[in-house]
Image (tube, helix red, strand yellow):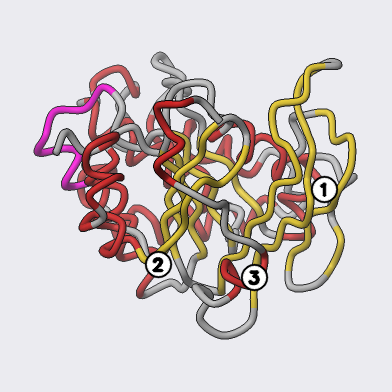
């Protein structure tokens, strides 16, 4: 851990992380070491989040935040440790298997909308591994019923959408598979403030009303911690501090290093 972050103190252990969970743990990571190629980025990393809870990962660039999402979804080399969903070990499953059998959906940081395809075609791309296409159409209709912004543009090319509407489409496309866990990389990146508020309102609705478990990486630390039940501050591939989102906002060390306070 670099000198700049030494003040954050002793890293929390699995017992302290479990105390932040409401009910049983939905997603659990135990002693995970993972990275890309031979490069290890996460070191003995632990995580625990309950059903329908939200957890925000903050920290400096290169701390390993996105690597955690990539590891849960199956995009990294895992050297040791394990990942569980409701007690079932899923460490070695492929991303497609995790989406289909465990209900884990990953929403990329990069703009992943296909601009020349219609909004509806983009939405249905979320069900590419489903065998029952009728079920996909039904889910798409539910999404159009819920989000007027998308309904009004369903037959138009996605390039007509605003930045906020594109992010809504990316989130909605993941919902077609009816996931229970949403992994979201930088939901606010590149968005105007009014759209940032809209996106977090959508995520709050998914968590509170549809009981989705949400794990997100967010550079806008204040916004991410305000939204989330739990916050982890990552430094050099490990959790330096963990707590309730609102408590971390009030923590003077977190404020000084990450909130501009």
132 with respect to 15 (left or right): right
- The residue positioned 40% from the left and 67% from the top of the image is 207
- Measured in 3D between alpha carbons, the distance from the residue under mark 3 to the one under mark 1, in whole angstroms, is 17 Å
Task: Report helix, strand or loop for mark 1.
Answer: helix
Classify 10 Å Cα crowding around label 3: few (below 14), some (14-19), many (20 and above): many
Can residue 110 be seen at all in this image of the molecule? yes
Residue 27 percent across, percent down from the top left: 66, 63
Q: Which mark is residue 97?
A: 1
Residue 152 percent across, percent down from the top left: 21, 42
Q: Is residue 46 above or below residue 211?
A: above
204 with respect to 237 (left or right): left
Q: Where's the C terminus, which quadrant?
A: top left
Can residue 151 be seen at all in this image of the molecule? no
- Measured in 3D between alpha carbons, the distance from the residue under mark 1 to the one under mark 2, in whole angstroms, is 23 Å
Query: Label 3: which residue?
Result: 26
Front residue (pair 93, 161): 93
Q: Which residues are magenta?
A: 190-198
Query: Label 2: which residue?
Result: 207
> Going from the N terminus, do you reach mark 3 or mark 2 first?
3
- The residue positioned 84% from the left and 53% from the top of the image is 82
- Measured in 3D between alpha carbons, the distance from the residue under mark 3 to the one under mark 2, in whole angstroms, is 13 Å
């Amino acid at each position: 851990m670099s000198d700049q972050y030494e003040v954050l103190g002793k890293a929390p252990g699995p017992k302290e992380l479990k105390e932040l969970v409401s009910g049983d743990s939905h997603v659990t990571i135990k002693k995970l070491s993972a990275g890309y190629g031979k490069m290890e980025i996460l070191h003995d990393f632990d995580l625990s989040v309950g059903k329908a809870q939200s957890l925000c990962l903050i920290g400096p660039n290169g701390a390993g935040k996105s690597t955690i999402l990539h590891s849960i979804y199956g995009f990294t080399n895992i050297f040791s440790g394990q990942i569980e969903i409701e007690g079932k070990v899923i460490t070695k499953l492929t991303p497609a298997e995790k989406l289909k059998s465990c209900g884990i959906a990953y929403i990329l940081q990069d703009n992943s909308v296909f601009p020349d395809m219609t909004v509806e075609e983009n939405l249905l791309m979320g069900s590419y591994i489903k065998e029952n296409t009728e079920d996909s159409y039904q889910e798409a209709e539910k999404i159009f019923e819920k989000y007027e912004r998308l309904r009004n543009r369903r037959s138009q090319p996605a390039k007509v959408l605003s930045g906020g509407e594109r992010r809504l489409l990316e989130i909605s496309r993941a919902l077609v598979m009816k996931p229970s866990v949403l992994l979201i990389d930088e939901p606010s990146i590149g968005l105007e403030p009014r759209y940032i508020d809209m996106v977090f309102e959508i995520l709050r609705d998914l968590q509170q009303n549809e009981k989705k478990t949400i794990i997100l990486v967010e550079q806008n630390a204040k916004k991410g911690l305000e939204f989330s039940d739990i916050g982890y501050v990552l430094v050099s591939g490990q959790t330096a501090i963990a707590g309730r989102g609102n408590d971390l906002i009030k923590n003077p060390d977190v404020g000084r290093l990450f909130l501009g306070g």
